[in-house]
Image: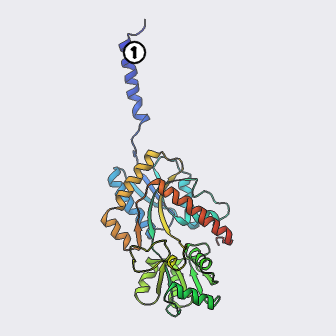
């Protein structure tokens, strides 16, 4: 005998109610991991840990930082690219991992644009142009004149072939029409030390590494490489004020694997931007020469695609490869 309509309806409602929680599970239901593709202690790692602290408080689930370093950031980035796009595995990466490595390395295990969901641009690193005091130039214009009058007399240091230091100098050579000698090191610290010692004459590097030596008089600061003056060093000109069109902005960003739902991406973007506006976070990162940003996923995605195209073409054009 058929069940009365009311009983059928009640059963359907009960069945839907039991099924609904599984279909509409709240996020997050478990801990979240932020991968940093470099060793602990650097500015990227410190920023990621400040984000993890803030997200833990606002999301009600533990957000832990895991360092997976190696291969110029490729190991940790690959791990995130292959993770599920469910919001439980995130990445704090940089312009080098997502816009330069694709052109520098053969057989890359990921595509810096296609294999990730851009969540938010986190910060800009104040990138400085410094010379040893023995170099007879106090401005970018004077350095260009000196380099033209003395071909190959200027040796510039870098953290290695294909590093942002290297690319900054190559862009300068191209914009100024000069030729200099590249001296690659295994990391930024020895590159700074040899420029301080006068064994190399020029260096493009993060202000965190150079400004203490500028303050002590061991290096001379000529400019910053961003398109606009840094709010942390408003009195210091940009390279572009002498060489229009020159720009190399070193940024950090938050990513998820490709295919993350738009609602989840927006939620993370809002939570992250709220943390980046905290006065204690701003002060700590400003003290490290890092300027915090406030962008939408769409704005960050446009920057990512534009820089990948720009630096990819330049690296291929100049035949630069990673060591």
Where's the N terminus, which quadrant?
top left
Quadrant in which the C terminus appears: bottom right
Residue 76's x, y, as percent?
53, 60
Q: Is mark 1 on a helix, strand or loop?
A: helix
Q: What residue is rendered at 57% in x and 58% in y?
A: 112
Q: Decide: is 45 above or below 9.
A: below
Extreme left residue here? 279
Q: Which residue does the image show at 60% across and 62% down from the upper left?
A: 309
- Residue 190 is at least partly visible in this image: no
Q: How crowded is mark 1: few (under 14 residues within 10 Å), some or many (20 or more)?
A: few
What is the x, y in percent for residue 40? 45, 68
Q: Residue 305 location in percent, x, y? A: 56, 58
Q: In this view, does 1 lie above or below 214?
A: above
Depth check: give the residue in front, 153 or 271.
153
Determine whether 263 is above or below 139 in the image: above
**Residue assigned mark 1:** 8
Q: Which residue is drawn at 58% across and 62% down?
A: 308
Using the image, determine if residue 319 lies above or below residue 254: below
Q: Which residue is drawn at 52% across and 57% down?
A: 302
Seen in the image, is 97 located left or right of residue 61?
A: right
Residue lying furthest top:
1
Residue 305 is at least partly visible in this image: yes
Residue 307 lies, in percent from the top left, at 56, 63
Q: How many labels does the image show?
A: 1
């Amino acid at each position: 005998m058929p069940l009365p309509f009311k009983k059928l309806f009640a059963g359907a409602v009960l069945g839907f109610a039991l099924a609904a929680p599984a279909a509409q599970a709240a996020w997050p239901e478990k801990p979240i991991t932020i991968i940093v593709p470099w060793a602990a202690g650097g500015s990227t790692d410190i920023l990621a840990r400040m984000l993890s602290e803030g997200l833990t408080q606002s999301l009600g689930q533990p957000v832990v930082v895991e360092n997976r370093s190696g291969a110029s950031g490729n190991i940790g980035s690959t791990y995130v690219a292959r993770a599920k796009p469910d919001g439980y595995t995130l990445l704090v990466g940089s312009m080098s991992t997502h816009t330069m490595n694709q052109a520098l390395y053969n057989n890359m295990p990921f595509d810096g644009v296609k294999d990730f969901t851009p969540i938010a641009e986190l910060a800009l690193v104040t990138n400085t142009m410094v010379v040893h005091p023995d170099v007879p130039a106090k401005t970018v214009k004077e350095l260009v004149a000196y380099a033209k009058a003395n071909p190959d007399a200027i040796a510039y240091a870098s953290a290695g072939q294909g590093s942002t230091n290297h690319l900054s100098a190559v862009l300068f050579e191209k914009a100024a029409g000069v030729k200099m000698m590249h001296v690659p090191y295994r990391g930024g610290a020895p590159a700074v030390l040899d420029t301080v010692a006068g064994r190399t004459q020029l260096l493009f590097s993060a202000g965190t590494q150079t400004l203490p030596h500028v303050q002590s008089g061991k290096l001379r600061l000529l400019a910053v490489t961003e398109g606009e003056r840094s709010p942390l060093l408003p009195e210091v000109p940009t390279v572009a004020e002498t060489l229009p069109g020159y720009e190399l902005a070193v940024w950090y960003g938050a990513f998820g694997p490709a295919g993350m739902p738009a609602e989840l991406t927006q939620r993370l973007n809002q939570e992250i931007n709220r943390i980046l506006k905290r006065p204690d976070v701003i002060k700590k990162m400003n003290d490290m020469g890092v300027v915090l940003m406030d962008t939408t996923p769409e704005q960050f995605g446009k920057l990512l695609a534009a820089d990948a195209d720009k630096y990819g073409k330049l690296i291929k054009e100049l035949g630069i490869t990673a060591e």
